[in-house]
Amino acid sequence: MRTVIIVDYGVGNLRSVARAVTRCGATPILATTPEQVAQASIMILPGVGAFGSCVAALKAHGLAEPVLQVIASGRPVLGICVGMQMLMNESEEFGQHAGLGLISGTVKAIPNTGSDGTPHKIPHIGWNGLHPASGDWAGSIFEDVQPGEACYFVHSFAAQADHAENDLAHCEYNGRRVCAAVRKDNLTGVQFHPEKSGPVGLKILSRFIAKA
């Protein structure tokens, strides 16, 4: 049975992520020390709340450097929600905050109107269909997902990658295209919560673990 390290830096309820990993047939470990993180062969970087607070908490717990070392070694890493956003260069949430700088781009507020100018609710909450950013999902952790299958989102900000090759999936929110997933080399980030997305989310997590 494969072991998946879930980086625990005191942000959010990680038990649901751990339960989902278990349902995928792997053994989750909530890693709270640099030594535990450094030993990861497969790693999940979660995140809930404000971007700046999450980055600060990761650093305060001494886990930013071992996370970067695992990523630099080429081991597979999945960022979830703010964990995905932290992979980018920076965020504009509550001021300018530097991210981990692993994928070139910025996290920006989702516009509070649809493409026709009609106001809509922010945050973007609920189930929304996934669509390939370009081409198809062959070879990615989405390869078992059919375009249009839905996952669960809760967010007010979204990543905007500088390079199209880093875009993996998007969803549509009242005519606006919103980034749902990014990728680069051994990194994949998803804006939605796979652990709260039923069978589709488990398919994505299972493929991530199987590809590792």
Image (tube, rainbow, N blue to C red):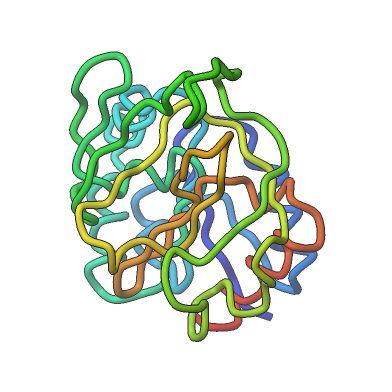
Vertical placement of 152 versus 104: above or below? above
Residue at 43 percent of width and 28 percent of height: 110
Q: Give the image quarter of residue 203.
A: bottom right
Task: Describe residue 139's horizontal placement relative to residue 209 as left or right.
Answer: left
x and y, in percent, of residue 40 in the image? 43, 67
Residue at 65 percent of width and 67 percent of height: 147
x and y, in percent, of residue 52 in the image? 31, 24
Label total for image: 0
Q: Give the image quarter of residue 107.
A: top left
Q: Nearer the viewer, residue 68 or 51?
A: 51
x and y, in percent, of residue 131 in the image? 56, 61
x and y, in percent, of residue 33 in the image? 40, 47
Quadrant of the image for the N terminus? bottom right
Q: Residue furthest front?
A: 116
Task: Describe residue 39's horizontal placement relative to residue 20 as left or right.
Answer: left
Residue at 40 percent of width and 57 percent of height: 37
Residue at 72 percent of width and 44 percent of height: 16
